[in-house]
Image (cartoon, rainbow, N blue to C red):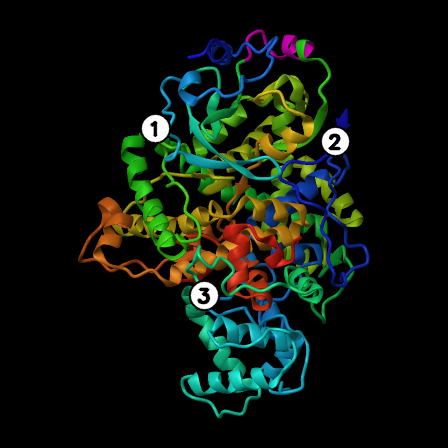
Amino acid sequence: MVEHERIEDTPGPLRSEQPAPRSARPAISRDVSSPAAAASAAVLALQRSHGNAAVARWLSGARVARPGLGGGGPRLARVIGEVEELVPAKEESARFAGDPTLARIDAGTKTLAKGDTGLAVLKLQQALVDLGFAVGVDGSFSGETETALKAFQAFAAPALPQTGVLDRATLAALNARFDTRQPYIANAAFDPAVPARGTRSLTASDKAAVKHAMVPPRGAPGLPSTFKEVVGGKRYGDELRDRLTDVIEALHKELFEAKEPLRADPAKNFHSWKVMEGPAAAAKDMTDKLYGSYATAPAMTHALGNFIDQWEDEVARDAALNAAAKKKKATDKVWYLIASDCDAVNAKHSAVPTDAREKAILDPIVESLVNTPGKVKRLLELDIGWEGAQLEGVVYLQRYKHDTDEENRRQMWELFHTCIHEYIHSLADPKFQAYARKLDSVRYNTLIEGFDDFFTETVRKTVVVDTALRKMIEGPYYDAAASVPKVSADVYPSIAQAEQVVSIVGIRDAEAAYFKGDVSKVGGP
Amino acid sequence: MTGECADARDRIVRVELVRWGGLPSGCRPSELFPELSDDTSEWAVRPLGEDFERAAFAVVDLPGYNRPTVSVRDGAVVMFDGMNPRLAGGLEPLVSDLGDPEARLDYRHGTLPVERGEWVYPSRGATLFVNTTADTALHVALYGPVTFRQYLRLLRPHLGKTLRPHPIAGEASCRSKGSKRRTRAD
């Protein structure tokens, strides 16, 4: 008999090739019978829902820098306590981020020229290839590289002096090109007659660089590296308990209490599935226009079974659970909230909630939040009212209408963007998914969510809003006189790691891996 | 409809799985569920197993399960699975009939982690996903007799849900309804 082989949806333990900021930083346990099981599950849930950076920051005491050439520094203050601020507010390419040599060039303290070698040179060469220049990619700044770089400098707008040297201005011009994502759009067509066009074989050092690039930077200087139970006269446990209590209260009000009455009159308060399917169909159309030569997938519709009401699904799940299972689910939810909503407290105390000292403080607090059926019920109701979820090919969402047409239009546009992301998940080749699952959880997130968002962002750049698209997305809320709502779209922080992988392997290799399953192009066997 | 497929359908509909010997090979969707078409080209797709091999799937209407799902590869049904199976006679006689599972795996039922709750009987073509106290089946998967390795690679259903990010608690009221966290202006 095989006992206890693996946990569903649990990739391998967290590993990093980079130094951990704290010697006691734990690996994520796969042993769900261990005391850390609930916390580990929460870490994995956070990692999969919020991305690598959130987990890395949590594990390192909330000290992970935002993407950026400098890798942190003055931006750090903005990330503490705000998971969403980990993602660049501007639409800037992360392609050249996280590289110390390129960071020095960006700072104006270094240049690269003929004769130089190394990963930064290779990234320059690959960037030139992705921009359409013919140059070998081997990490050696040759005459050919110099010639191609001069051609780019002449091609840049405004044109740069044709020095053939990678300096600050030339790097900025390269960044500007990739900010537009036009090089990625231009390389999105697959030619089955020449399937390997534009791809290359990775060397052993390329593969090592790729695996390194999949992991976000950890830690930041200047912050304490050990847990402090008392800060400013306040105890970690007391602050965490207060924060959790507030979080549960606020989420319950918003996600459940405000919504439950609406379920009494679905005809009045729910969008029909047909209305919800309009943005999904538009998302498929836009994605197929760009990547349809690589792969397509069926539409997302309720009738097909891949568009589900989250509320109904959770109610059905909970109905079959006994008290013990409900308590287990509620306990897991509390750990999830510690990971996702308590950053400020954890950062203040340099706390890693799964570390022994912190966990010893948190365990009784978590227990106090699930020690009555009423408390358990409230926690389960958070999942019932949760805005959205996904399960391998199936999207779960809420269908509530908003109060005004303007809000409903916005909701439909947000759904459109979400559906691009979910549809691109369904385009991932099985071999790519299987390879990702064999990696540790951080790299898994980079390959699955980061790569998805990398392609999602590229599709978003191709969206041309016209009347037909508006009608498709906005459905009954379409109003020619109204402006198209400016909406925001979620981006997983690991999109930065995905683009940094692309900076090494090139866009064609990334596409060959994701859509065609040639995982050797992203460091696989 | 072949006799074997009809018998399997009858057992599935009645959720009577004692003495279940596996899904017959080669049953077309319409042989198991007449309401289904054999043309799966427009069906939704799900990955199964550690190889993430795709299968077309359709949800059928059966009172004995939540979301009873038929998965098809190459025109043949490879798996039937459903949530909250109302097992005829309950769990105990079925477990008694199936004997010791070949493996008890950890799995996630939606967002509920269940330790050693995925009981795999590959030679019988069945997997029971039980709850944390192992007294209720939360999910059942039925397939043709296979080896444990084949089950892991090609059939094991993915049942864990991933929640999408939510607005920061306590700040939600400051945002418009429907807005999400970690935003990036489009």
**Is residue A353 or residue B50 the one in the foreground?**
B50
Magenta residues, as a range? Answer: B87-96
**Is residue A242 or residue A85 the one in the foreground?**
A85
Q: Residue at x 68, y 80 (%)?
A: A117
Asked whether disc 3 touches disc 2, contact meaning CB atoms under 8 Å apart, the reply is no
Mark 2 sits on what residue?
A4
Q: Position of residue A524 (x, y in %)?
A: 65, 54
Please identify, in this view, whether the residue under mark 3 or under mark 2 is nearer the observer. 3
- Mark 3 is surrounded, within 10 Å at the Cα level, by few (under 14), some (14 to 19) or many (20 or more) other residues, namely many
Distance from disc 3 to disc 1, alpha carbons, whole Å, reads: 47 Å
Name the kind of residue labelled 3 in the image: Tyr
- Mark 1 is surrounded, within 10 Å at the Cα level, by few (under 14), some (14 to 19) or many (20 or more) other residues, namely few
Q: Do labels 3 and 1 share a chain?
A: yes
Above or below residue A488? Residue A95 is below
**Which of disc 2 and disc 3 is earlier in sequence?**
2
- Mark 2 is surrounded, within 10 Å at the Cα level, by few (under 14), some (14 to 19) or many (20 or more) other residues, namely some
Say which chain tag 1 marks: A
Regarding mark 2 in the picture, which secondary structure is present there?
A: loop
Q: Where is residue A437 in the image (x, y as percent from the top left)?
A: 63, 45
Tell me the tag on residue A27: none
Q: Do labels 3 and 2 share a chain?
A: yes
